[in-house]
Amino acid sequence: MKSQLLAFAAVFVSAISIQAAPFITVGTPGNAGLSTPTGPSPNMGGTTINFDSIVACTVSACPSLVASGVTFSSPDGLLIIPFSTQSFPNELFDMSPNGSANLSFLNAVGRNAIGVGIADSDPGVTITIQALNSSGVAFGAAFTETISEATANPGNGYFVVSDTSADIFGLQITQSTGNANFSGLAIDDVQLSPEPSTYLLLSSGAALLFALRKRLRA
């Protein structure tokens, strides 16, 4: 019986740690500030980072930035810049000199969903959004999205990557376009869904083990 319980526990732990396939929801911003997208709600009920009160990286580019426990990085360097036609009052800007972009951010705790508001001045640009695990490694299929020119504010878009498990620790956003007339990628805000409760997870596992034990005794 003991071996059966241990085997069940191992299967249970393995099942809850398996990474499911992420999926994406695309929204359309309702105004220049991306504050009222008609797709995913602008309020996911968790943590929101909008860069408006962050003073780091406002003069010279920095390779990484930490805000609300989330680490942002780019090989091109990052800069927080003030009001633009796409975003206000501040946005996080990838400093790529040729219109490409490679911007990642990673959280210490896995979430069910992460949302990101893109404020790019180059309409019709195609970006790739990739979910990252706890090690910052890509998992699941990457999502290729074109920031539509048909919206009221060309070059803007809101994207939420979700999963049935709280295994999304971050996102990598790349823009492969190399065009001297294009700017790098700008992010208006990042949202994290509420942090999962480890206590509830352990309680559920204990309840299942208790039920199985009673069944084996019967």
Image (cartoon, grey):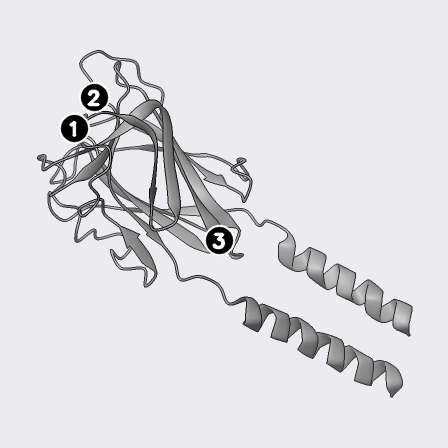
Percent x, y for residue 27? 27, 47
**Residue at figure coordinates x 83%, y 63% from the top left:** 7
Residue hosting label 3: 109
SS of the residue under disc 3? strand
Task: Tally the marks.
Answer: 3
Closer to the camera in the image, 177 or 81: 81
Q: Quadrant of the N terminus?
A: bottom right
* SS at badge 1: loop
What's the residue type where badge 2 is placed? Ser
Inspect the image, locate mark 1, and give the three-letter code of the amino acid beneath it. Ser
Q: Earlier in the sequence, mark 3 or mark 1?
A: 3
- The answer for how far apart the CA atoms under marks 3 and 1 are is 32 Å
Q: Which mark is residue 12?
A: none
Quadrant where the C terminus is found in the figure: bottom right
Could you tell me the amino acid type at mark 3? Val
- Marks 1/2 in contact by CB < 8 Å: the verdict is yes
Residue 167: percent from left, percent from top: 53, 51
Instruction: Classify 49 as above or below 201.
Output: above
Of residue 80 and residue 156, the one placed in the foreground of this image is: 80
Q: Which residue is mark 2?
A: 183
Give the label, 3 or 1, closer to the camera.
Answer: 3
Identify which residue, 31 or 5, lies in the foreground: 5
Q: Name the residue carrying label 1.
A: 121
Q: Which image quadrant for residue 71?
A: top left
